[in-house]
């Protein structure tokens, strides 16, 4: 099996060591996710592996016959049509085809000698090996999968947006299916449907893949191993992102335990030295001092700060109906984006709006905050609703101030409190003294989101709040939103984020909203069934529902419901209890098997074997899915 070997790579810029002694391998069929905070050196490491940047030390080995494909974040294209651009990826195959046709003409005229016939045989075999007959179908499969149309293929590339150009570069790399594929943030500028297509494509990919991504859901579905780049070194985890996160947290807990034990040992030793350094045991005290001096101290990574929202500017109460939209329409010129759209957001909801690019999600948000007037219908905010809007443009930031000054001046708090909030959003130490105009896009996003959380708004409107954020920053935003006691409406393609924060999902498709009372996984599950989805609740329906609830008898408790549950239709209560006991036993067995797999995954010897680790990780994921199905079965039987 051919592999990519990375052995002892290091890179520094002046006195700053970016990373050192980085070693790992990627085999054909493996998909390795390279993760780490912004600035950790992920892109630099990838460029060193590709030979586009010179490392300070270490080696990279790959078979000379292996082909390499690379998709970087900045796209560079020609000036022809999109179809020409895709055909350019197969220029060697088209040259073979031209030569093959020339020889076919010679053979047809009877002018070809034995040597030319042999040459034709070699070229025809090579052309077939490269699947030259399938080039056009491959172009259309990848192009359509990434959201391009027949009209796009006929059009020029010069007018494409930056995001579209990135998709073109991604498509060109995927078209040739190289032996090793390097992807730097491949899900940027892709909507959820395109990301899911890319996931399926990569899961069936025969070559090796090394990809940089902050999309945790994508990493969970695609990666077979994770390479964590942090603290100037790399650690390899044999599993997907969730497995990496679990093992990393366990190691952090073990490190904290070891740290506490070492600190206790240090305190005891220092007390012994203090007591006996001048007495009869002075020699022993000096010996212990030498041991203490030689001790390699355990250093803990920074503690993850948490956002305690109630400590500062909690939002005020507002009406039960936060926003009501009735039969609304939006259009630009003659183009109708949506019409007859209705929705209701209730107090306390965390609503995720999902859908393909171009469906009008951002237009809907701008309509709610008053930036756009509906072409028809109405948009009404409830009483005492105070809106806070995150638009990605960060218009409210004062670029000449420092990070700390922005919080002090805008909210009139003391420095200790301001530093506490900034720390929760990963601005620590001297970072709070940086000028806002010098911050990266992701850092400005973090600061803008923090300010939004502190305005006292009780209804947050968020347009792609995790764009340009690395994973630690996304976790900070999630922590803040989960602590937020108000209501929010968010448009995002980050499925992991949506699963963490949203309790309602609304899909925008074909000019209408469909409501699902759960997070992203729940929405996908319901979409895959044949059940008719529940339409988004309109204000008129809400009024009828409220009246019905007021007239209805007191809602029964869960305990009351369980007491009155009848057996399933056609099944006796005795039989149902038997099935329920069997389901409970099967569930217990499956959970025990999951524990055994967890134990195997944590075995250090097994982690050294990539193939065994991969099989265990796949078995673990399959067992989790089995347990979820068994819980559903058990729940149905328990409810009767």
Image (cartoon, rainbow, N blue to C red):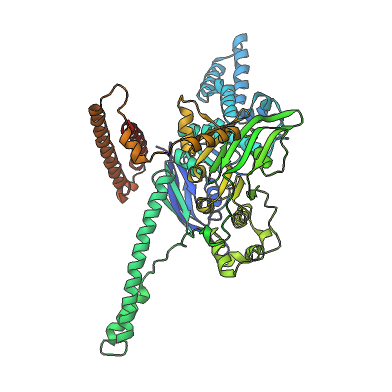
* Residue that protrudes farthest toward the top in the picture: 109
| The quadrant where residue 400 appears | bottom right
Res. 204 visible in picture: no
The picture places residue 321, in percent across and down from the top left corner, at: 58, 42
Q: Residue at x 62, y 29 (%)?
A: 91
Left or right of 280, for residue 376: right
Is 47 or 248 nearer to us in this picture?
248
> Looking at the picture, does residue 134 appear above or below residue 308?
above
Q: Quadrant of the C terminus?
A: top left
The picture places residue 195, in percent across and down from the top left corner, at: 54, 36
Q: Residue at x 31, y 79 (%)?
A: 288
Question: How many numbered marks are there?
Answer: 0
Q: Residue at x 55, y 40 (%)?
A: 352
> Looking at the picture, does residue 239 appear above or below residue 8?
above
Q: Quadrant of the N terminus?
A: top left
Is 77 or 268 nearer to us in this picture?
268
| The quadrant where residue 134 appears | top right
Left or right of 380, for residue 475: left
The picture places residue 172, in percent across and down from the top left corner, at: 59, 33
């Amino acid at each position: 099996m051919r592999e990519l070997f990375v052995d002892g790579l290091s890179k520094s810029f002046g006195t700053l060591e970016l990373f050192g002694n980085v070693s790992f391998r990627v085999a054909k069929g493996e998909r390795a996710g390279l993760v780490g905070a912004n600035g950790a050196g992920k892109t630099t490491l990838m460029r060193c592996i590709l030979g586009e940047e010179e490392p300070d030390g270490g080696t990279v080995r790959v078979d000379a016959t292996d082909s390499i494909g690379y998709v970087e974040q900045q796209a560079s294209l020609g000036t022809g049509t999109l179809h020409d651009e895709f055909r350019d990826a197969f220029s060697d195959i088209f040259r073979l085809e031209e030569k093959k046709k020339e020889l076919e003409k010679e053979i047809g005229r009877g002018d070809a000698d034995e040597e030319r016939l042999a040459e034709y045989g070699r070229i025809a075999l090579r052309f077939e090996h490269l699947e030259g007959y399938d080039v056009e179908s491959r172009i259309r499969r990848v192009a359509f999968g990434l959201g391009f149309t027949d009209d796009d293929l006929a059009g020029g590339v010069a007018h494409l947006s930056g995001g579209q150009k990135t998709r073109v570069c991604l498509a060109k790399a995927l078209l040739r299916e190289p032996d090793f594929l390097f992807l730097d943030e491949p899900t940027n500028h892709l909507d959820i449907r395109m990301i899911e297509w890319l996931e399926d494509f990569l899961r069936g990919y025969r070559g090796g893949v090394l990809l940089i991504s902050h999309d945790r859901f994508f990493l969970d579905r695609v990666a077979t191993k994770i390479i964590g780049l942090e603290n100037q070194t790399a650690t390899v985890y044999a599993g997907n992102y969730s497995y990496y996160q679990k093992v990393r947290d366990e190691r952090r807990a073990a490190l904290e335990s070891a740290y506490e034990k070492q600190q206790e040992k240090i305190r005891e030793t220092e007390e012994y030295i203090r007591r006996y350094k001048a007495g009869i045991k002075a020699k022993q005290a000096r010996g212990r001092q030498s041991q203490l001096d030689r001790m390699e101290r355990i250093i803990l990574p920074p503690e993850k700060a948490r956002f305690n929202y109630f400590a500062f500017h909690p939002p005020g109460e507002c009406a039960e109906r936060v926003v009501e939209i009735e039969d609304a329409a939006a259009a630009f010129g003659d183009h109708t984006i949506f019409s007859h759209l209705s929705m209701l957001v209730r107090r306390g909801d965390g609503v995720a709006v999902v859908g393909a690019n171009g469906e009008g999600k951002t237009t809907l948000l701008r309509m709610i905050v008053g930036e756009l007037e509906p072409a028809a219908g109405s948009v009404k905010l409830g009483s005492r609703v105070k809106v806070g809007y995150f638009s990605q443009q960060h218009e409210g930031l004062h670029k000449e101030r420092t990070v700390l000054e922005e919080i002090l001046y805008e909210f009139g708090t003391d420095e200790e409190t301001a530093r506490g909030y900034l720390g929760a959003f990963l601005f620590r130490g001297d970072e709070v003294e940086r000028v806002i105009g010098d911050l990266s896009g992701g850092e400005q996003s973090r600061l803008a989101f923090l300010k939004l959380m502190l305005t006292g708004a009780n209804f947050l409107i968020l347009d792609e709040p995790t764009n340009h954020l690395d994973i630690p920053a996304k976790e900070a935003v999630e922590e803040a939103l989960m602590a937020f006691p108000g209501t929010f409406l968010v448009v995002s393609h980050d499925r992991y984020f949506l699963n963490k924060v949203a309790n309602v999902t609304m899909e925008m498709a074909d000019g209408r909203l469909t409501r699902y009372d759960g997070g992203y996984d729940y929405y996908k599950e319901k979409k895959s069934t044949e059940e008719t989805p529940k339409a988004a609740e309109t204000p008129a329906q809400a009024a009828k529902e409220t009246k019905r609830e007021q007239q209805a008898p007191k809602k029964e408790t869960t305990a009351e419901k369980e007491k009155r549950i009848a057996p399933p239709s056609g099944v006796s209560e005795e039989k149902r209890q038997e099935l329920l006991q069997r389901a409970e036993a099967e569930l217990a067995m499956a959970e025990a098997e999951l524990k055994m797999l967890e134990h195997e995954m944590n075995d250090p010897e097994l982690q050294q074997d990539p193939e065994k680790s991969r099989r265990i990780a796949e078995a673990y994921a399959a067992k989790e899915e089995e347990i979820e199905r068994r819980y559903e079965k058990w729940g149905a039987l328990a409810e009767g």
